[in-house]
Structure formats: structure tokens, C-alpha cells
Amino acid sequence: MAGDEARIKELEDLIANSQYNKRTQKAIGLYKAQLARLKDKVAGRKSGWKSEGYAVRKTGDGTVVLLGFPSVGKSTLLNGITGAESEVGSYAFTTLSVIPGVLEYEHAKIQVLDVPGIVSGAASGKGRGTEVFSVLRNADLILVLVDVQFPEHHDVIMKEIYDSGVRLNKKKPDVKIKKTAKDGIKISKTVRLPHLNNETIESVLRTFRINNADVVIRSNITVDELIDCIEDNKKYVPGITVLNKVDLVSKEYAEKIARKIQANLMISAEKKDHLEELKEIIFSKLDLIRIYMKEPGKEADLEEPLIIKRDSTVEDVCRKLHKDFVKQFKFCRIWGQSSKFPGQKLSLKHKLKDNDILEIHLR
């Protein structure tokens, strides 16, 4: 193991000290592929991130994880937006287990989890890191909380998130790799790849012992994203960055730090400043929509919407309402943006839009 870790350090130094250009592209690609394989080996993640962690059952319309260094104010923030009673202290590691709370906003019930504060090296297991990041990979939204007095923590947290296999605010690249029995590696591209040539792609694939494959690339990817697609064990999760304790510094300094770390919002959890704005951002980032249910022959219930993810289908709604609704489904009628005319008769696979009215007919 010591040899592997020494090689990891050696490869990291090689990558850091190499200038990326057409001439060095293949070599750096190989270094990065070798590094990814070694890190997986050391972390014991050959078949994906370990599943051990805190036992947290996902509930509600979405799950948000509060992530930050110890004593950044996560417990105070959780209490401020949910009313949960997480222990609050001015010393490090107050929270020693996951504390759940429920944020109610725009009829949505959003689960918010306060996890123990992370430290540098958490992604490799230091300071309860393995447990924290197993919760993180199941989140619908990650809220990165940064103390305005320690802005350097932001880059450390972002590196830990990346090293844990989570890709924050990124979409999974459109890359298909189908292993074949013979004929080598065939590469098809529908986009230009200014940072990646065929020779580098083939070298990286062979590092992962893929010598015969049909590869179709429809996204402009980097070598790091190619490696992610080969490993196929990454999670793509939306995130927001929030700067806390801004009441302790000048407005000018807080704004300077907010720009530097590209914070979505500046708050004081202690003073409860800007928490309503934060709730609105959370709701928006979770990409939730409202559907109003209507029973046949009755008026629609416009008081209490059903909250679902954007791009959900009628089938998704049926599954949320009752486990037998999909089997018993005959047809539905829809009034709203997703229908061509009021009361249009549609099927299970129909995608719904915000503020649609849905009438389900069962057998």
C-alpha cells in the first residue's frame, strides 16, 4: 500500500508540473488514468464508492446535505431553516451524527441533513469522511457552507467533494463505451474535442484494460471527464455555495470573499439574515414543480399541490401516490402547459410541467 501511495504522490507531482498542450496531451492523459486507477485501488472502490455510512432514510420531496468545516454554523443554519434541534456549540465537531430536519417551502417538504464537519483528507476516510461522503452521494442538493473568516476552506471542500466521486453542478457527459470482442478501439465523435485527440483516448482506454470497444462521444469532454465515463462510478449532484457569519466582517470584505468563491448567497445563520432567500434558492435548485390533482367529475384541488421533480412523467406521479396505481392505470387527462388542449387524454409516459392539473383514471 505504501508503494501505491508513493506512486500516487509521484503522479500528482508529474501532472501538477506538466504544461498541457498537444505535445504533452497523451502523456498527461496516461498519468491521470494511472492516478485514477491507483486511487480507486487504495480507496477500495473498484466497483464504486463503499456503501457504508450513516443510516439515513430519504424522505420528502428532496434531500439537501449541509457540508462544511467544523464550527462553520451548519447546526445553527439547520435550526434556522427547519426548526430541528441540532446541538449548537462554538467548538469543533459538535455534530457527531447526521441530524435531519424538514424545510417546508412552497408546499414542498425538503429533508435537510446536518452532517459532521469535514476536514482535509475526508474523502480518503479522515475524520468520519467515508461516512459523510456516503450520505453526500445520495443527496439531491449539496449546500457548501463557508465561514467568511476562513475562505480558504472553500477550495479544500471542493477538492474533497471531487475526490469523493461527486461532480458538483456538472451534467454527466454523453459518452457511450461498448466493449467488443475484437477489432480494436473505434471512436465516433459528433463534436470537436479541442483538448482530446484519438491517440490520447485510446491510450487512456488501454490503461483501463479496454482494448476493444466502440466509443461514441457526443459531448466536448476533457481527459478527466473521459476517465469519469470509463470508471462510471461518479455522482452528478447540483450544489450551492453559501457564505456564513457575514455579520462578523465589513460588508465590503464579505462581498469580496463572496465574489472570490462564487457564493450564491451571503447569510448570517446566527442572526437569521437572508434565510428566506436561501429557502427560495434551495427550492429552485432542487428543480421541483407543482402538480394539482383532480378527481373525475370534481373540481381540481388548487390548494395543496403534489411536489415532483421537473421532467417527471405521469408514471412517476402514480408511483408516488400508490404502488398499485401504475398497474391499475387506464389513462389520464391533463389541463395546463404540457397538454395541447384542456383535458387532453394522455398516457403514463407523458412528461408533466409546472402547475399542470392531472386527472388519473384507473381500472
Image (tube, rainbow, N blue to C red):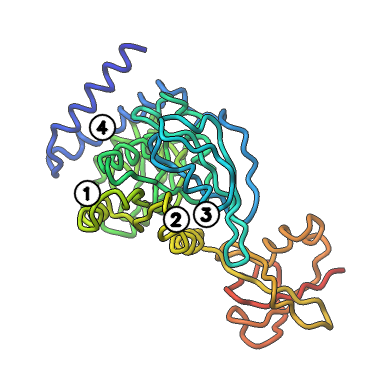
Quadrant in the picture for the C terminus = bottom right
Q: Quadrant of residue 152?
A: top left
Asked if marks 1 and 4 touch (Cβ < 8 Å), the reply is no
Residue type marked 2 = Lys
- Residues 202 and 138: in front is 138
Q: Which residue is mark 3?
A: 81
Q: In this rendering, would 32 be left or right of 96?
A: left
> Is any part of residue 174 visible from this angle?
no
Image: 263 above or below 99? below
Image: 72 above or below 220? above
Q: Which residue is mark 2?
A: 272
Q: Pointer 1: residues within 10 angstroms few (<14), some, or many (20+)?
A: some
Q: Which residue is mark 1?
A: 195
Frontmost of labels 3 and 1 is 3
> Which is more N-terminal, label 3 or label 4?
4
User: Residue 223 placed where, x, y %?
Assistant: 28, 42
Q: Which residue is mark 4?
A: 30
Residue at the spot 27% in from the left edge and 19% down from the top edge: 7
> Which is more N-terminal, label 4 or label 2?
4
Spatial CA span between label 3 and label 2: 9 Å
Frontmost of labels 3 and 2 is 2
Q: In this rendering, would 87 be left or right of 267?
A: right
Residue type marked 4 = Leu
Residue at the spot 45% in from the left edge and 48% down from the top edge: 142
Spatial CA span between label 2 and label 4: 49 Å
> Which is more N-terminal, label 2 or label 3?
3
Residue type marked 1 = His
Q: Secondary structure at mark 2?
A: loop
- Residues 127 and 322: in front is 127
